[in-house]
Amino acid sequence: MELLLVVNTYEQKLGNVLAKIRLTRSRGWFERYSNSRMDKEEIATLRRDVDACWKDFMRKLTVQVHEATRRIEEGVTNIGDITYITKLFPLPSATGADHNTCLPGTRTGVLDYIRRWADHQDTVQVCWLTDVAGAGKSTIAKKLSGEWRSKGRLGACFFFDKNRPDATNKQAFCDTIAAQLANNQPQLLPLIIEGIQAIGPVLSVCPFEEKLQKLVIRPVKDAAVVLVIDALDECDERDRDILLRNLLRSLTQAIRLKILITSRPEKDITELLGSYRSPTDSLHDVELKSNRDDIAMFVKHQMERLVQSGDLTVEEVTQLANRVNCLFILASTACKVIQKSLSPRSRLQDLMDPKRNSLGDINRLYLAILTKACQIDQDGQSTDSEAPKEMIEVLQAILAAATPLSISTIDALLGSKSTGRVVEFLSSVLNVRNDGTVVILHPTFREFLEDRRTARPFHFEITDAHGLMAKGCLATMKRELRFNICRLESSFMRNKDVPDFNERVSKYIPEQLQYGCTHWLDHVTKSSPRSHENDRTAALEFVEGRLPLYWMEVLSALGKIPKILRDLQEVGSWYSEKKLKDKFKDIKQFLVAFSTPVSESIPHIYISTIPFAARKSYIRQEVRGLFPKTMSVIIGYSKNWPEPPQEWQGHTGSVKSVAFSPDGRRIVSGSEDNTVRLWDAEAGQPLGEPLRGHTHYVQSVSFSPDGRRIVSGSLDKTIRVWDAETGYAGYVGDNHRVVFGLNTDTIRLWSAGIRHTSEEQSHPNTHMVSTTTLNNAPDQIPLSQSNESHNLIHSLHFPPGPHFASPGFDDCKLLQDGWVSSSNRLLYWVPPNNRHGLQSSHILTFPTTSHLRSTWIDFSNFCCGTDWTKCRE
């Protein structure tokens, strides 16, 4: 039913686009010309709607279609099981759909070896195919995964890809593998569903190790299937370390499982997989006849059309094959350059010129491609003075982008119209994907551009690229942000309760604005200090006046308030001017104080926050006069932002242990509710969701000395190491140790990263863990403290208040989360320190800053409901 609704919506959107095109075609030429700008904008809006529906449709289709088909074929009536699979969030892009497969008749030696390895159960469980970049490893992985799928042997595959940020870490790995297992091996579906049920409602934040065990390892325990993991070197180094260690540790639990892994020979990967290395010959060794024959066959196949048309001769194609040094990426790129040229023979002769030696290696070929695109002569002069600058800026945007961007989005961010032309000129190294986004074809091109020695005059520092993107994001926000951007008619509802809220976001917030609002601060913190100072004036202009509130509207619509709070914690230190630092600090304090109304309802960014904002807040001082028709707090207001609350609410059980991060900016806590929580030490607000994984009280917590990890000890007799940034659980490097105390008058030293541990360390704990400390130096063993040193801090919960009056509304009540509601309509939100006084406003309190202080509100100018937009002057 859910998939049918998505299909119907998608069909409706496509119908709207078709109707618009038919209407346009039915007009006369003059009417078409006069309405062209309006039509273009409307079609662009319709396209964004269609793209959003398409992404939603493909995600649901990925996890449902194959399973539903198999169940129908097998006569299985319990289709309800499919609803469990839809709780997974697989990554469709990680299935390798964008990769090519080997040309028939090539790579026969290595393919035959891996086939034999997979078919014989007495061989090692892991095969590691490693070689230099561009040798053709991914095409081999793609071909074999296709063969194994057709034979019913494939369990799942995961292709890491630096062009896709969500495919460069382990976050979606387990969901993607489990969803494919359910599709490819339907007999495993009950075991996968059992794992999903065992994890329960915390599936999205479940620690990696637990999810891997319950969704992947246990289901394949007795299954003779093959997993394919391609381009492991393109996964974040810390994540791939955790992934590999957990996979290797689990092999004994699934002895019939085979895993094919491909990657470059990176040092950290070699240390773990060296013993599993494939004994096959190098894929790029020019001395091997098999490699030369494979390259010749590939080049002949690629140039076949040009030979048939007479643009090239067989002899010329043979000469090209002999010059590309048995490196597939070099051969593939050279063929693309020639194929896309208006004069293939002339372009081939340029590449074959021994003086230029463009085919000497891949870097020389990249340099030739960029030089030709800019029409730069031998003296380094360009026939178009703007071409090199425009091209470099487009390449900077593509490489620095936090997510792949479309041509129109890049143009909007850069304030240019050259992206399409640059992408066309560089089509041999850039690729426009099916969704319209632009990515580089191979990671070697990124490495070339970032190498000062090889890429002159096209080299750029990635920090400068981030500076360019930060500038573009800021300019886009200043140009396109506006009041009530989603055109909401009423303030009585939360964002999620507005029936067509997602459609409004897609329609009224263009892609470049969504990107700019979300990733501006990312680029600021990754750019050079020079970039910060150059953009200082523009940044200062942005954080003054109403623009910060308009920015919050978009962040609220996109659900990005928690992310921006984390970004604001970092960005203040990147600017040297005190006023700018103070402004960013004020924005952060504003968001912390009003995170509930800002996150939940866009209209209340104005009608609920401005009245209660601290009198000395920059935001309040600058916008109070611009939004006069809101409530006025007569008694009970704050002059300054409140200090962190004395009681921090978030745990549902007693807090057993707390610890500061090394920089003093975060606090970690462990509780009897079996969770670990991170807190902003300055604001007293929780950072993200609780870290779940323990099955009993969390007795002790501690940060690592670098602040990047958290260790927790529990009465469930386990210790866990967490990533302090992402919240995912896993093991850390070999030079890290955990010291923990047991209720047996002893302490133990646990190796948190070594795959093979001593007998004592590898046995599960048989006593409760009382205290833990994570330390980098194995020879520095801190003594654990006694249980008596941990004070119990009980969480406080605000009880529902009595009903009270708000002018113009009946039956008003104050909810636990601070909302004042009348007949399920949100009227306004009240900060914690004003809630008691709002219900007991007749009581005079001293001092007036008390958290029990009286609160008197003047509603004479209050605009809400369908009149909420009148709050603006």
Image: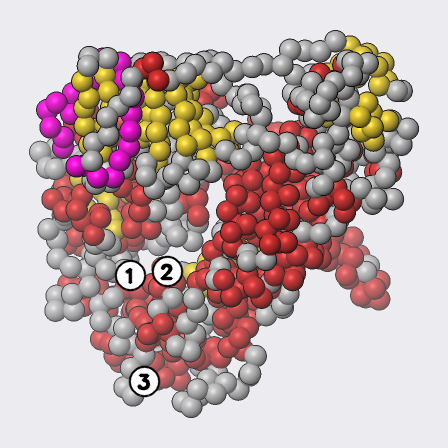
Q: Which mark is residue 134?
A: 1
Earlier sequence position, callout 3 versus callout 2: 3
Residue at point 31%, 43% (across, down): 238
Q: Which stretch is magenta?
A: 756-779
Q: CA–CA distance between discs 3 and 1? A: 22 Å
Q: Nearer the viewer, residue 576 or 188?
A: 576
743 left or right, relative to 379: left
Residue 178 quadrant? top left
User: Which quarter of the rendered picture does the N terminus lie within?
Assistant: top right
As drawn, is 521 to the left or to the right of 820? left
Residue holding disc 2: 442
Pointer 1 local density, CA inside 10 Å: few below 14, some 14–19, many at least 20: many
Distance between the alpha carbons at the discs numbered 1 and 2:
8 Å
> Looking at numbered disc 2 in the image, what kind of residue is underneath it?
His
Task: Please tell me the numbered disc located at residue 261.
Answer: none
* Residue of label 3: 356
